[in-house]
Image (cartoon, rainbow, N blue to C red):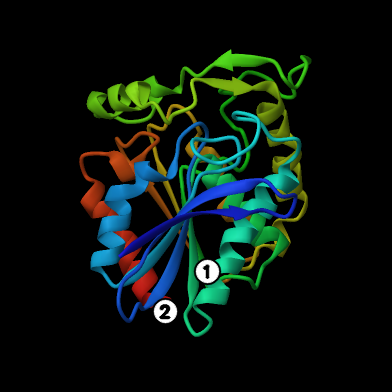
Amino acid sequence: MFKEKMVSSVDGTKLFMRKDLVEKPKAVIVIAHGLAEHLNRYDHLTARLLKEGYSVYRYDQRGHARSEGKRAFFNDYTEIIADVKTIVDLAKAENPELPVFLIGHSMGGFTVSLFGTKYPDAVDGIVLSGALTRYSKETFGPLPVDMPADTYIDNTLGAGVCSDPKVGEAYNADPLVEKKISIGLMNMMPEGIHYLKENAEAFTAPVLVMHGLEDGLVSEQDSRQFFAEIASEDKSLRIYAKLMHEIFNEPVQNEIFDEVVLWLDKHN
């Protein structure tokens, strides 16, 4: 069973969200997607989680796909935290007896890392995939960019998402994938990364950090440094040889899903 609806974030921006529910769930998973994409690109992961007895809440980040907001734009990193908190709070309110976990990919990993740093006891665990936490690879060049926030550049990320060319082709052809990215969004990132670095000791949640060694968009060094600096006592790091940015879409995705499910099952 699934339900879709619009949910208001703290500033009134309406976020499109989807709930996929199972009977007698073990826990609830909230998924945060990456830059320029949308919640439907996590259908395969969601299907596996549902099969394993987890209910899943997903949302389109503000300015993305069906959510409101200026396209692919953030004023500052606090907005990205407020939005995921809105969905987490809803998941917890609707499932008061269940554990709640976060899964974030790329910019979604940035999102949930920020959330976990600001609200260390809010969820029962966090899974990161190709998370932007340090900007070791300057994908957009040096940041911040000295241009007006409402300037846009073309989205050219498709070539680096996956070793399977069909995934990149589908990404580029997807009408819900944002075709342009704002300078405002890019310049929000170094502020958030500074916050993550300065407050690494505040991140104490159980965490599984996953990254492809051949990631061409976000360096696996981001995950190594984040992992080394956070204060979590329960933390695991997986660096996958030969895999690129979207490990959940690689040909070995089922093996990645196995690891995620095993970790979640251990932390229920």
Residue carrying label 1:
91
Amino acid under label 2?
A: Asn
Which sits in the foreground, 257 or 18? 18
Q: Find the distance from the CA under tag 2 to the CA under tag 1.
A: 16 Å
The answer to whether one can see residue 230 in this image is no
Comparing marks 2 and 1, which lies closer to the viewer? 1
Disc 1 crowd, CA 10 A, few/some/many (<14, 14-19, 20+): many
Is residue 222 left or right of 256 when viewed as pictured? right
Instruction: Determine whether 107 is above or below 52 in the image.
Output: above
Which numbered tag is attached to residue 268? Answer: 2
Disc 2 crowd, CA 10 A, few/some/many (<14, 14-19, 20+): few
Q: Position of residue 186 (x, y in %)?
A: 66, 27
Residue at position x 42%, y 31% in the image: 176
Q: Position of residue 156 (x, y in %)?
A: 46, 17
Instruction: Determine whether 257 is above or below 131 in the image.
Output: below
Which sits in the foreground, 244 or 177? 177
Q: Position of residue 187 (x, y in %)?
A: 72, 28
Q: Secondary structure at mark 1?
A: helix
Residue at position x 64%, y 60% in the image: 85
Label 2 vs 1, first from the N-terminus: 1
Instruction: Determine whether 193 is above or below 52 in the image.
Output: above
